[in-house]
Amino acid sequence: MRSGNQWFCALDIILWYPLSSSRMHLRQAVGSHTIARMGDPAYESLIRDATIDDVPAITDIYRDAVLNTVATFDTVPPTIESRTEWLQHHGGRFPVFVAVVDGQIAGWASLSEWSDRGAYAYTAESSVYVATSHRRQGIGATLLAAIEARARELNYHTIIARVVATNETSLRLVRAAGYDDAGLIREVGYKFGKWLDMCVLQLTLPCTPDSNARK
Ligand SMILES: CC(C)(COP(=O)(O)OP(=O)(O)OC[C@H]1O[C@@H](n2cnc3c(N)ncnc32)[C@H](O)[C@@H]1OP(=O)(O)O)[C@@H](O)C(=O)NCCC(=O)NCCS
């Protein structure tokens, strides 16, 4: 669990992404807590590390996916408490980002632990969820770019995305972000009365194994 001080440190790095037709242009502001307008003032946006205050919005977005889609294999809708606990188990090597558009949380993304076994120290799993009201605006792609940028900083080698085989939208999204197909696990999930296949995709990043990695 992260201390209050650790949360403060996480906020020290704020990633800014103008979301426009020429999206993916990435600027980083390090050591600033100031929110500035960028680009079109009618579409102010940024991506930053999530804080505890973002939990209600993250929960709402995720609840919609749990209840109405097979994008997640979670079947129990999240509560504020369960998502708070989830967020508290992230941070550091397992960041959570939110996309803020016109002051509203429009989406979130995370890098989560793939396994606690030592040899997986350079591997993590990415997730991205965008509110239905804010889709097709480049937010999902921008969140994935934020995940990749942080994964490079954190010296990860392999980022895995698990995408249910029927989720063409997400498959397009992660393939466009450079993930390669790594395999298919057949009938690994059962939700809404159907067996579901899972595609596994991976993004491979340059990485130098070092002695600071988790043992
Ligand atoms: C998948 C999801 C994150 C995409 O977010 P988004 O902000 O709408 O995506 P973007 O606008 O950044 O689109 C990026 C790319 O994804 C693909 N894409 C996104 N929405 C699409 C759609 N409705 N149909 C086809 N392709 C789509 C396209 O390749 C698109 O690039 P393009 O606009 O240049 O064609 C969003 O639909 C979502 O939250 N879905 C439910 C949860 C989910 O499936 N999460 C992934 C599982 S981890």
Image: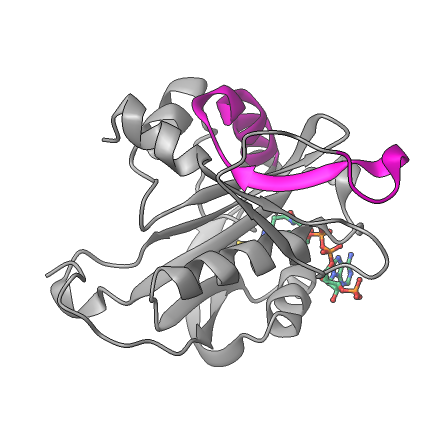
- In the image, 54 versus 9, the foreground residue is 9
- In the picture, measured across the screen, residue 10 lies left or right of residue 181, that is left
Splitting the image into 4 quarters, where does residue 156 fall? bottom left
Give the residue displayed 37% in from the left and 72% down from the top: 158
Taking the view exactly as shown, the residue that stands out farthest to the left is 215
Q: Is residue 148 visible?
A: yes
- In the image, 162 versus 214, the foreground residue is 214
Taking the view exactly as shown, the residue that stands out farthest to the front is 31
- In the picture, measured across the screen, residue 46 lies left or right of residue 209, that is right
Give the residue displayed 54% in from the left and 74% down from the top: 179
Q: Is residue 187 visible?
A: no
Residue 88 at x, y percent in the picture: 32, 30
Q: Is residue 39 magenta?
A: yes
- In the picture, measured across the screen, residue 67 lies left or right of residue 55, that is right
Splitting the image into 4 quarters, where does residue 102 fall? top right
Image: magenta residue range: 37-64
- In the image, 35 versus 61, the foreground residue is 35
Q: Quadrant of the N terminus?
A: top left
| Model colouring | one colour
Rendering quadrant holding ligand 1: bottom right
- Judge whether 163 appears above or below 127 on screen: below
